[in-house]
Image: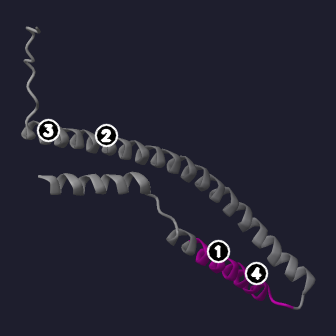
Amino acid sequence: MSTSFHTETEPTVTQLVSGIVHDAQDLMRQQLALFRTEMQEDLRKTKEVAITLACGFFLAQIGLSVLCFMFVYLLHALQPTMPLWGCFGIVGGILALVGGVCLAGGIFYLKSFNPLPDESAKALKENYKWITTAR
């Protein structure tokens, strides 16, 4: 004959629901931390790329300016009857056209780019929705 008694009580429904809500809040905090970490990492990488691009852009701009003058004077040397302002106009028009095409391509690419981490944001929204409707 067993004399041991089972003294542990089963958790109540309130305790179970409270535990579920607490776990959901912990999950939400963890996902917010993950989202914040991903955003910080993306921001760090973006800053590194932006600095590199700015330096490259600056140096390329100087180089292109010198090359533009070279093309203007080359065109004037090949066509001495053409006035110098006409040579500047032809070279400037070609560069403006190429620049416009590059800008249009960049705008198209920018519209297709999403800088936010999609998976974390989606999971965060789902958990927030679940927590707000569970109360």
Secondary element at image label 1: helix
The CA span between labels 3 and 1 is: 60 Å
Are the residues tagged 4 and 3 within 8 Å (C-beta)?
A: no
Whole-angstrom CA distance, mark 4 to mark 1, is 17 Å
> How many numbered discs?
4
Indicate which label's residue lies in the foreground, 3 or 1: 3
The circle drawn on residue 1 is: none
Q: Mark 3 points at which residue?
A: 16
Mark 1 Cα shell of 10 Å, populated few (<14), some (14-19), many (≥20):
few
Tag 1 residue: 102
Three-letter amino acid code of the residue under disc 3: Leu
Most extreme residue toward the bottom is: 81
- Specify the label residue 91 is tagged with: 4
Residue nearer the viewer, 122 or 17: 17
CA gap between label 4 and label 3 equals 76 Å
Q: Which of marks 4 and 1 is nearer the N terminus?
A: 4
The residue indicated by pointer 2 is 30
> Which residue type carries mark 1?
Cys
